[in-house]
Amino acid sequence: MKILVMGPPGAGKGSQSAKIVDSYKIPSISTGQMFRNAYEDNEPIGIEAMKYIKNGELVSDEITNELVRLRLQKNDTERSFLLDGYPRTVTQAVALDGMLKKMGTDLSAVINILSSNDVLFERMEARRVCKECGATYHLVFKKPVVEGVCDKCSGELYQRADDTLESVKRRLEIYETKTKPLLDYYDKKGILYNINGMQSFDKVYADIELVLRDL
Ligand code: AP5
Ligand code: MG
Ligand code: ZN
């Protein structure tokens, strides 16, 4: 199972990806999370990436493609993997095709989670993320048991640097201009599945499972 999870910022890619990788025991490759982890660990690539991330801009295709290329070289991706948030430009999609061709494989499905902009704004404003493990919460729809503390690892919950109003606006603009054209690219390959992301967590996941069980 080699799948991409796509969708605008805040659509629920990370939340649904966490459930998929947990049920199917497949490795998750989230470029956003990898950049945030690298920043937390004071790695040069993380510090460089955060200059762009905090303003809602994309990190360069060169840096991002190289990050994914190195990750896909690890043995655990041979049979299955889930990509969350990559590719998000046509250049990245072409680069990914090249990497997969070298591996002698191809994508099984692209899960595209859809949502309206007002829902996206609301979700990002109320999102809180664990500093330690990256688990994602929502102040109303997915509250931690103890305020400000991660249920899974007791790590501190914080608001992402790119969840400011200005940055969210910019991320949505970039999604429209740079990432949305990819949907057509995957639709033409016949592997695009649209999912309504404006439902409960469980209903969104149930719809995704209907796609995955037939792969
Ligand atoms: P990335 O981390 O990928 O962020 P994003 O695409 O903006 O998406 P988000 O993580 O914000 O949203 P999500 O869809 O995962 O939603 P979530 O599940 O958290 O990328 C961040 C940045 O890194 C980019 O802007 C860029 O700078 C850089 N970057 C990353 N990849 C790159 C690439 N390939 N190329 C270049 N640069 C790259 O849910 C959101 C909230 O809603 C949460 O609070 C959640 O609890 C809640 N929620 C989710 N689903 C539901 C539901 N069904 N009902 C109620 N609440 C829900
Ligand atoms: Mg995410
Ligand atoms: Zn945690």
Image (cartoon, rainbow, N blue to C red):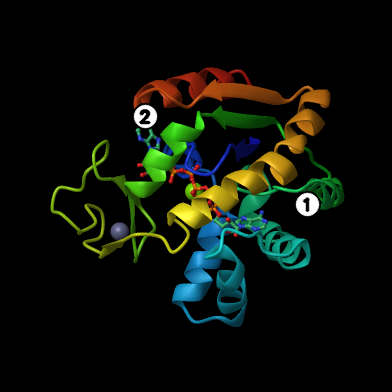
Within 8 Å of ligand 1, the CB of disc 2? Answer: yes
First in sequence: mark 2 vs mark 1: 1
Residue 139 is situated, as x and y percent measured from the top left of the image, at 25, 45
Give the answer, above or below, for where 82 lies relative to 115: below
Three-letter code for the amino acid on which mark 1 is drawn: Gln
Foreground: 5 or 159? 159
Which residue position is annotated with label 2? 201
Near-viewer residue (56 or 129): 56
Q: In the image, is 106 to the left or to the right of 76?
A: right
Decide which of 39, 20 is in the foreground and name it: 39
Number of marks drawn: 2
Kindly identify the residue that appears in the image at 20 percent across and 48 percent down.
144
Which residue appears at 58% of the width and 50% of the height?
A: 171
Q: Few, some or many C-alpha atoms within 10 Å of disc 1 (few <14, some 14-19, many ≥20)?
A: many
Query: In whole angstroms, how far apart are the C-alphas of marks 2 and 1?
Result: 29 Å
Splitting the image into 4 quarters, where does residue 142 fall?
A: top left
Mark 1 lies on a secondary structure that is: helix
Is ligand 1 within 8 Å of the beta carbon of the residue shown at mark 1? yes
Residue at x 39%, y 21% (from the top left corner): 203
In the image, residue 186 above or below residue 73 = above
Dot 2 alpha-carbon crowd within 10 angstroms: few under 14, some 14 to 19, many 20 or more: some
Residue, x 21% and y 43% (percent of image)? 143
User: In the image, 106: left or right of 114?
Assistant: right
Question: Residue 157 or 3: which is nearer the viewer?
Answer: 157
Quarter occupied by the C terminus = top right
**Can you give x and y, in whole percent of width and height, for residue 185 in the image?**
81, 33
Residue pointed to by mark 1: 92
Q: Quarter of the image containing the N terminus?
A: top right
Q: Are marks 2 and 1 in contact (CB under 8 Å)?
A: no
Q: Position of residue 95 (x, y in %)?
A: 83, 52
Extreme residue in the left direction: 146
In the image, residue 188 above or below residue 94: above
